[in-house]
Image: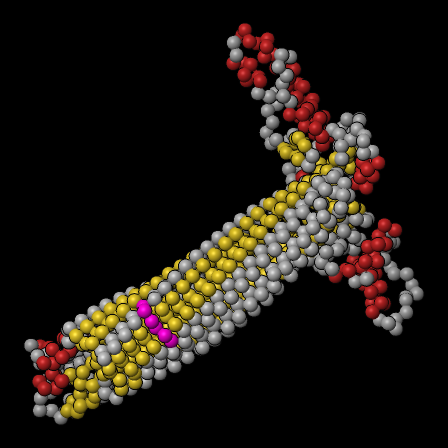
Amino acid sequence: MTSQQDDDDVEEWRVLYQETFGYRHPLFHPEHAVFQFQPDPKFTGHNRNRRENNEKDEKEEDDDEEEWNPWKESYEQLSRGVHVMNSMEQFVGAADIQCFDHIDEALRFLDENPEGHHEKLIFLHEGTHEVNHTIRIASDVQILGASSSEDIASTVILTGRHATVLEFQEGSNCPYLGYVTVKYEVDTEHEAQVAQQLIMEVDEGAEPPTDEPKAGPLLDDDEDDDLEKVNGIETDPTTNCAMIVTGAGVEPTIERCNFQSGNADSHTVVVKDHASPKIRNSTFIGGSGGGIIITHQATGYYDSCEFAQNLQSGIRVQFQANPYFINCRIHHQGDVGVFILDDGLGHFQNCEIFSNSKFGIELKSPQTNPTITECEIHHGGSGGICIHEEATGQFLKNRIHHNEFLAVWISEGANPIVRSNEIFDGSHGGIFVHRYGKGLIEDNDIRGNELAGIFVDTGAEPWIRNNHIHTGKQAGVYFYDGGSGVLESNEINGNTLTGVQIRTGANPRVVKNRIWNNDNGVLIHEAGMGSLEENTVFDNSMTNVFIKTEATPIVRRNKIFGSRGTGISVTDGGKGTIEENEIFDNAQSGVLVLSEAAPVIRLNRVHGNQSAGIEVSSKGDCVVRENRVFRNRFGGIMTASGSTVKDTQNQVYDNLDRVRKAIDSGHCLFSVSGKEFYPMHNFYRCITCNSSERNAICQSCIERCHKGHTVMFLRCDRFYCDCGADHLERSCCLRQT
């Protein structure tokens, strides 16, 4: 056969193939329920190139080889199917092809001829195919849309108005549906008639109407569906929809289909009662109700599907259903993206869940326990994920970001695992554990949220460990209103306000964390409690640990150093126990007690701080005992007038005592403090110079600069010298010399 003859033969098969099936490319059907397009067929196969390059003595052998013709091969693989089209006039294929004008007829023909020439294969041709009752599939039939369009499914539409359009039921173990749009359209007149019948049943005194309802005629085939609606099943989210897959062993393969429904009381597609479909590359868009519901122990595999713009949830899983979703896009729903409840399970992997009106994912009720992994969950209207009412679940390796409220909300006894996620750039907070919520929160990167990285309140008890919580606009972790739990081995840094904040009766255990480079490291206030144990708290801008306003924490066995302010500040009535800590190298005091605070400070090692080791001022009343206080710049333990210190069994040694030495040498205290420090010593006012109590003058300046003036001793307290700072009318003569 010549090269020209090869080309002519291929062209003849292409024309016959496209006249019969309509497809632009060869569609191969190597086995049951497997269909694969070859997008760019080589018309005369690979043998020609090899033949042209061979030596002349091999030409005859190569000429005898049969050329591979993809159009012919595809035609032969598909030729045993039957065809359904709206008009027989549109069909110009081979004469031996069996054609029907309704899908019911094609199904009946295949059922009545099981041993015949034809395969259980139906080609549904371009156009809208209306059905007046549910098409029930109880065999392994294969149904394909057939069209010359690039988007085949959009031009092959199977639609119904009075009942579910398509149902795969027991007996259909491995059927196939591909390249079809299945659409349920609500017949408003028909629905009005059904609603009138329901009203009659509810109203016991009502009599039946004497006139016929002005609706279209009801078909006999619809009577069972109408009776179901009269009995109230019209509100069941698993009826009157585009497609139902139901029954044990029912495992259809569904590819590249579009599903649509106008029924606000149902989901577009229902999978139930142990069914297990494989649905790939299909869309569930624009439903007046939800996208898909999987219920009553159904499973299934859902790959690369899109769920969008449904008025309710995109996906609903309940009653021990356990589907597997991968590579799906779930977005712009009128409610939540994925709703799992009532013992629902499931596995969601590598899905993008975004821009849903409420949460991206919601879990509720006990025994609800899905796995969500490697998903992108973002721009939720109410937040990213909501887990409540004792639900559990695993959230692993997801990216949860740019949600409008909270990234993850855990409440009402919910107990999930939230592990190895990135939770960032939320418009509110990162994770909120609320109202007796629990959960294991570990190995997450929580960053850049507008409020706290993690909130814990109202009896919540999460275990929060090994997370990196950083660069938040407020607190890193915030416990309040009775929240508790364990905060362990986290890296908490770079948050604008505090690393950890505890208030209003919260009582967490904070252990083995690194808390650094925040404004305040740990803030406990407003009757907050909790225990801080074995943490490393360092390099915070203001105070490493700040206790105030009736807070009563235990601060034990921590390393507290490098603050640009004090190591520990206790003020405004703060209390608590500070024991067995290493407090060193802070830019101000190691421990500062102010404003009627009353802590117990014991068994600590306090050294190398740039102000005093321990300072008690402003009516502080504390116990200071058995501490080792050494090598602090201004002194060891220093107490202001009006403060009470029960000072016993402390070891105070080798402090630098710069304050005492400056006074003993006749130097102004400003020379050792500047405006950055507040050394504790006696301070005075000068009545002659008209200074007020707001101006503090050190003893050296009183003796030299204000010699012979009328002066008044005020008290021993923390101050820097206003004379030395040149805040008075006369310049300090000690500073000049």
Q: Residue visible at 57% across and 20% down?
A: 46
Does residue 141 show up? yes
Q: Residue visible at 41% across and 59% down?
A: 466
Quadrant location of the N terminus?
Answer: top right
Residue 345 appears left or right of 478:
right
Q: What colour scheme does the image use?
A: secondary structure
In-front residue for pair 143/342: 342
User: Which residue is most to the bottom?
Assistant: 710
Residue 631 appears left or right of 469:
left
Quadrant location of the C terminus?
Answer: bottom left
Does residue 474 show up? no
Q: Residue visible at 67% across and 46% down?
A: 277
Q: How many marks?
A: 0
User: Which residue is most to the right?
Assistant: 210
**Is 427 inside the magenta-drawn segment?**
no
- Quarter where residue 313 is shown: bottom right
Residue 94 placed where, x, y %?
77, 26
Residue 676 placed where, x, y %?
22, 73
In-front residue for pair 356/321: 321
- Quarter where residue 562 is shown: bottom left
Residue 341 appears left or right of 577:
right
**Is 555 inside the magenta-drawn segment?**
yes
Residue 206 appears left or right of 71:
right
Magenta residues, start to end: 553-558
User: Which residue is most to the top?
Assistant: 57
- Quarter where residue 668 is shown: bottom left
Q: Residue visible at 15% across and 76% down?
A: 657
506 versus 254 height, above or below: below
Residue 449 placed where, x, y %?
44, 62
Residue 76 placed where, x, y %?
71, 26
